[in-house]
Image (cartoon, helix red, strand yellow):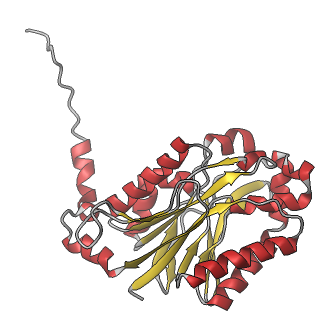
Amino acid sequence: MTRITIASAAYPLDWLDDWAGYEAKTRAWVESGARSSADLLVFPEYGAMELASLGGAEVAADLERSVAEVARHHDAMERLFEGLAIEFGLYILAPSGPVVEGMARRNRAALFGPSGRIGHQDKAIMTRFEREEWFIDAGGEGLRLFDTGLGRIAVLICYDSEFPLLARAVCEAGATLLLVPSCTDTLAGYHRVRIGAQARALENQCVAVQSVIVGQAHWCPAVDENHGAAAVYAPPDAGWCATGVLAEGDYDVPGWVTATVDMDAVAQARTDGEVLTFRHWPEQPMQAAQVRLVSENPRKA
């Protein structure tokens, strides 16, 4: 498949009275994305945290207990998204959320396709809040590269997009599409991830997709304040738009943002672009190893 339509979510967290309410909301969002003729739906980081409400107000308001509550529903959530991906015949990156494995708690996003579950990616590098207050652990299995009918896809969860070597590793392995599900509570945080996603698209001459959580969820302190805009980015190069922003939603406005992209343009940019940042990456170490200090006022002999 060369031309694909990608839908990126600006997703609000809702209080849920029961599992049926979550099923109904999820189906409505997938149906809406499918109506846009999307081949791929991208949900945001920690979108699964709204499942904490199923444990009641006291559980949802507690950082420790909210993790356990969301993890308790993890398998059911995966079955729901798997069934919808099969039913609608599309690919879905489900909302990420905490899972508990032994003593470890990880932030996991799973990818589904028309044939079912493909695999998952755990967040690789944790933010200060995750490390120091929430005690979510970094992924222990490295990065995954998903070989799909849409091409080779990698997932860089939020903060991961701010580290160039992660994207470089998966792109050298063949990734042409980077999915960046995010959850940011400030304008500055949103722009850090946005700039990271755009920079990774520039460096690797590929497509990057940022999904976001929007709105307030004061009943759950882990995700109480959320800001951002969903978008699809590409390198500002021949065959792409001049800004590199293929599609972008309004700030803090819920809904899908869609873009149709020709994935052959990735290979074209990497082989015959106006610049060749992907090919020229290996030239950096030699130059970086030759740093020389030049003083404005050198000592006189």
Is 108 on the left-hand or right-hand side of 271? right
Residue in view at x 58 percent, y 54 percent: 252
Is 151 on the left-hand or right-hand side of 109? left
Q: Quadrant of the C terminus?
A: top left
The foreground one among 213 and 250 is 250
Query: Is any part of residue 118 visible from this angle?
Result: no
Residue in view at x 40 percent, y 73 percent: 176
List x then y, in percent, for residue 47. 69, 61
The foreground one among 169 and 24 is 24
Query: Is any part of residue 52 visible from this angle?
Result: yes
* Residue 9, above or below 63: below
| Quadrant of the rendered image containing residue 158 | bottom right
List x then y, in percent, for residue 24. 78, 76
List x then y, in percent, for residue 248. 46, 62
Q: Quadrant of the N terminus?
A: bottom left
* Residue 12, above or below 35: above
Residue in view at x 82 percent, y 59 percent: 15
| Quadrant of the rendered image containing residue 197 | bottom left
List x then y, in percent, for residue 170. 44, 66
Is 203 on the left-hand or right-hand side of 166? left
Residue in view at x 81 percent, y 62 percent: 51
Total marks drawn? 0
| Quadrant of the rendered image containing residue 73 | bottom right
Residue most extreme to the top: 300
